[in-house]
Image: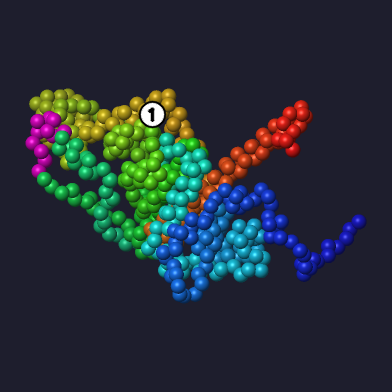
Amino acid sequence: MLKKKEAHQEELEMVTLSSLVPLDHLLRKIDAVIDFSFIHDRVAHLYCADNGRPALDPVLLFKMLFVGYLFGIRSERQLMREIEVNVAYRWFLQLRLTDKVPDASTISQNRRRRFNDSDICQEIFDEIVEQGIRAGLVDGTVLYSDSTHLKANANKNRFDRQVVEKSRADYLAALDADIAQDQADHGKKPLREKARQSVAKETKISRTDPESGYMVRDGKPKGFFYLDHRTVDSAHALITDIHVTPGNVHDSMPYLSRLDRQRARFGFDVQAVGLDAGYFTAGIAKGLEDREIEGVIGYRRPQGEILNYSTTNRSGYREYKSSPRVCKTCPLRDACTQSRNHTKVVTRHVWQDSLEKITANRLSPWGKRIYERRKETVERSFADAKQLHGHRYARLRGLVKVREQCLLAATAQNMKKIALILTRKGAFCDMLLWIVSNWARKHGILPAFAE
């Protein structure tokens, strides 16, 4: 029988907020295993203790942001509208059904005035990683690193051309020392003392977001981007490090310093790392060797032949040159070299042996297993970030604000993964307890335990 639905929107009902949230909701799982109380202590020094208007609870403030990142809500204004009508969000934030939701400007003003010069987002990220370590979900034995691009909030057609200094690698001091040693080993005079000059090049600078970088990479879109350099632990793919640079910074530039930060901050005993071909440089290979860490890195095959040693240049390359007397009469000279002095020059880095060790690792059975895990760890982490957590675009402008976005998004991903893993383990333990209890009751064994 067809009946018309009666309207009940104005009726009063006696309900609790908790009863309206499904027991298996993601926010319930996060609330059960993640401790947010540390946020108070970390931000206390940023608030006035004895005067001024009562401040919004900082735990509530950051939990609101986490809701936005967990569920891919890109706009903070839209986030506030969603919190107003979503009972699960209100339950997680400990807001009553009738409580007023803070205005979006509260977040922006706290970001601009209170947290602008602080490192609170990094501290929150680190604390969640430590909670994962204490739960046994992170061991730091094998780490995977890569980068992904976020489109800057800038028009790629509005730019000025400027000459700027290129980023410097973080291993140049060690390279200078080894160049001097290599010169001495070959009986050569040391190179004349000269401070390294930063390499300058003309590049495009965005008029809208000058701190972004114009990215030009094979197979990637061209335009103004930021790079999220991310490291993931092999055990459960929890993110252990986030570092943001303009889009025109090479992946290898900040890698070693970020690796050192994780070892110092979390006490990781890193045994091996898995990286893609963008990290296959002599500096990375030597840095890993010095740290007694095995590297498994993708490879792009070079070409060339090795000739007689001539010298070691300031860039760290040994130069091997042919004899001009031999080359001058060689019938294949034109196909080999076009130099005016009839000399073929081939270079080999002073750290080439370290590169060759990396290549051997990649071809070994254990190296193949480690490299195969890249797509299940760091690449999967980026895919989830882009698909589920709004990580394709930079929400705000400026390196500091994009760094905040990347740190909070990674923190949200870690909280989600920790909650899902631990609640799954808890459900397994409950099921095992139920099976044992039923078996004991059935056989009349351990009646007290069965009860």
The overriding secondary structure of the stretch rendered in magenta is: loop
Instruction: Report x, y in % for residue 336.
Output: 21, 29
Q: Is residue 112 left or right of residue 359?
A: right
Residue 95 falls in image quadrant? bottom right
Q: Is residue 61 left or right of residue 347?
A: right
| Of residues 213 and 75, the one drawn nearer to the viewer in this rendering | 75
Q: Which residue is mark 1?
A: 362
Residue 341 falls in image quadrant? top left
Residue 244, visible in the rendered structure: yes
Q: Quadrant of the N terminus?
A: bottom right
Q: Which residues are drawn in magenta?
A: 182-192
Residue 352 falls in image quadrant? top left
Instruction: Report x, y in % for residue 299.
Output: 36, 33
Name above or below for residue 398 compared with residue 31.
Answer: below
Residue 191 belongs to the span the image colors magenta: yes
Instruction: Report x, y in % for residue 27.
Output: 61, 52
What amino acid is found at the position of numbered circle 1 in the picture? Arg
Q: Is residue 443 left or right of residue 154?
A: right
